[in-house]
Image (cartoon, rainbow, N blue to C red):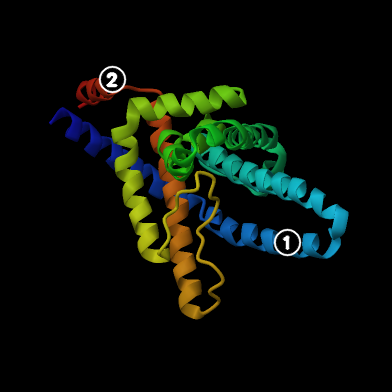
């Protein structure tokens, strides 16, 4: 009963605050269109200019561009959660604000995958193939709060990863109940499971029909609300315990 009471008030407060933040920062919804446009232009430029030997550089450029857009989005969320708003200067600054930290975390993930492929997978044999299929799911579950850890905590890249794991271990129930609801809603809209920890916009593929555009806009609204909700929820859970939250609510009744 105590757990249910805490879940009710925790999500009630998060829903109210997230709704207010999205209404004040509706521009966050539009970032999805901007990131898609940047990706399209970047793909065209790379496919045109980086031919032959230069194609090796395209992977590095794409990795930096991905990290830069992720830095931008997380920086906007950081400003909204901390001060309640973002402006054009924040948007421009965001492409580099968290770039080093984001790129370092992505690099840790890449190095881990390379080491697994080169060392562990051959040793495990057929079992290795099965584990390879499980790894993305395990990462999604065990490090689900990694984006929020990146922009709300001032740790170095490795400490950020370990904190995200510890956060989920301590708050898995409170965290996954609302997140599961959001994942189901996005799945109903798109027919896809959003299991990428670093998604920065709603994805629907190349559906340029009117129905596709309307679905994309609705999906982008839900996605933006979800990311704000996660940020608000993370902020509350990371600075309190269930006992403390219940005590403070009873104290100020």
In the picture, which quadrant includes the C terminus?
A: top left
Of the residues tagged 2 and 1, which is closer to the observer?
1
In the picture, measured across the screen, residue 31 lies left or right of residue 237, that is right
Instruction: In the displayed orientation, state which residue is furthest to the left.
Output: 1
Disc 1 crowd, CA 10 A, few/some/many (<14, 14-19, 20+): few
Q: Would residue 39 be seen by someone viewing this image from the given angle?
A: yes
- Specify which label sits upstream in the sequence, 2 or 1: 1
Residue name at image x 22 percent, y 39 percent = 8
What mark, if any, has residue 244 been given in the picture? Answer: 2
In the picture, measured across the screen, residue 243 lies left or right of residue 79, that is left
Q: Marks 2 and 1, how far apart in space? A: 50 Å
Vertical side of 184 occupied by 70: above or below: above
**Residue 47 position within the rendered picture, expressed as x and y whole percent measured from the top left:** 78, 63
In the picture, measured across the screen, residue 143 lies left or right of residue 79, that is left
Disc 2 crowd, CA 10 A, few/some/many (<14, 14-19, 20+): few
Vertical side of 165 occupied by 141: above or below: below
**Residue 166 position within the rendered picture, expressed as x and y whole percent measured from the top left:** 42, 24
Tally the numbered discs.
Answer: 2
Foreground residue among 85 and 145 = 145
Residue name at image x 47 percent, y 52 percent = 224
Q: In what element is the residue under mark 2?
A: helix
Reading the image, the residue beneath label 1 is 43
Residue name at image x 39 percent, y 49 percent = 19
């Amino acid at each position: 009963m105590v757990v249910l009471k805490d879940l009710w008030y925790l999500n009630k407060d998060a829903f109210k605050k997230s709704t207010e933040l999205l209404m004040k920062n509706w521009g966050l919804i539009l970032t999805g269109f901007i990131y898609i446009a940047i990706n399209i232009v970047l793909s065209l430029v790379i496919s045109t200019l980086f031919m032959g030997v230069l194609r090796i550089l395209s992977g590095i450029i794409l990795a930096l561009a991905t990290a830069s857009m992720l830095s931008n989005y997380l920086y906007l969320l950081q400003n909204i959660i901390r001060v309640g708003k973002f402006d054009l200067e924040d948007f421009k600054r965001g492409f580099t604000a968290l770039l080093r930290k984001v790129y370092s975390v992505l690099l840790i993930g890449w190095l881990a995958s390379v080491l697994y492929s080169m060392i562990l997978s051959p040793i495990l044999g057929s079992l290795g193939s099965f584990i390879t299929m499980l790894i993305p799911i395990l990462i999604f579950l065990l490090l689900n709060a990694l984006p929020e850890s990146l922009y709300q905590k001032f740790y170095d890249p490795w400490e950020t990863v370990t904190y995200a794991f510890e956060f989920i271990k301590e708050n898995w129930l409170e965290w996954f109940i609302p997140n599961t609801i959001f994942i189901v809603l996005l799945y109903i809209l798109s027919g896809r499971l959003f299991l990428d920890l670093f998604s920065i916009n709603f994805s629907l593929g190349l559906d340029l029909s009117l129905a596709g555009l309307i679905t994309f806009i609705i999906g982008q609204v839900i996605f933006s609300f979800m990311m704000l909700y996660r940020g608000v929820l993370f902020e509350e859970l990371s600075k309190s315990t269930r006992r403390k939250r219940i005590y403070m609510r009873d104290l100020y009744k």
